[in-house]
Image (tube, rainbow, N blue to C red):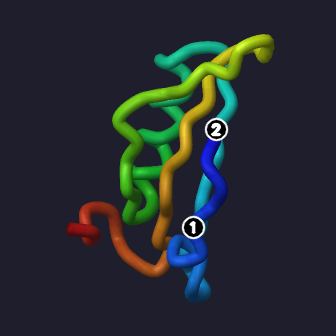
Amino acid sequence: MKSINEAHVARPGLAVVDVAAADDQTAFAVQEALAGRWATALADGTTRVPGEPGVRLRCYLDVRQEPGALA
């Protein structure tokens, strides 16, 4: 995965969440659960790292805002 951009954690309440899961369905289920609780910039897809098991997904949270508050 790419390095975390400083802007994504520039203020208290902002977080970057990296999910490692066995498959796409599980990774997106975790993302959906996070999005149900906090404002979340959703990932469109997962990535696979050659030689490593499972998939990876990164999403961005703002725990200060209600779900759906991000544009």
The N terminus, quarter of image: top right
Give the mark count: 2
- Which of disc 1 and disc 2 is earlier in sequence? 1
Residue 23 sits above or below residue 30 on the image: above
Q: CA distance from mark 2 to mark 1?
A: 17 Å
Residue 61 sits above or below residue 52 on the image: below
How far from the left and from the top, in percent, is residue 25? 47, 17
The C terminus, quarter of image: bottom left
* In front of the other: 19 or 51: 51
Disc 2 residue type (three-letter): Val
Q: Residue at x 58, y 14 (%)?
A: 23
Apparent side of residue 9 relative to residue 37 in the rendered image (left or right) = right
Residue indicated by mark 1: 5
Residue 45 sits above or below residue 51 on the image: below
Disc 1 residue type (three-letter): Asn
In the picture, the disc for residue 71 is none
Q: Residue at x 46, y 80 (%)?
A: 64
In the picture, the disc for residue 19 is 2
* In front of the other: 27 or 34: 27
Nearer the camera: disc 2 or disc 1: 1
Q: Residue at x 61, y 30 (%)?
A: 56
Apparent side of residue 68 relative to residue 4 in the rendered image (left or right) = left
Q: Residue at x 37, y 47 (%)?
A: 42
How far from the left and from the top, in percent, is residue 34? 49, 50
* In front of the other: 20 or 26: 20
Q: Secondary structure at mark 2?
A: strand
How far from the left and from the top, in percent, is residue 68? 25, 62
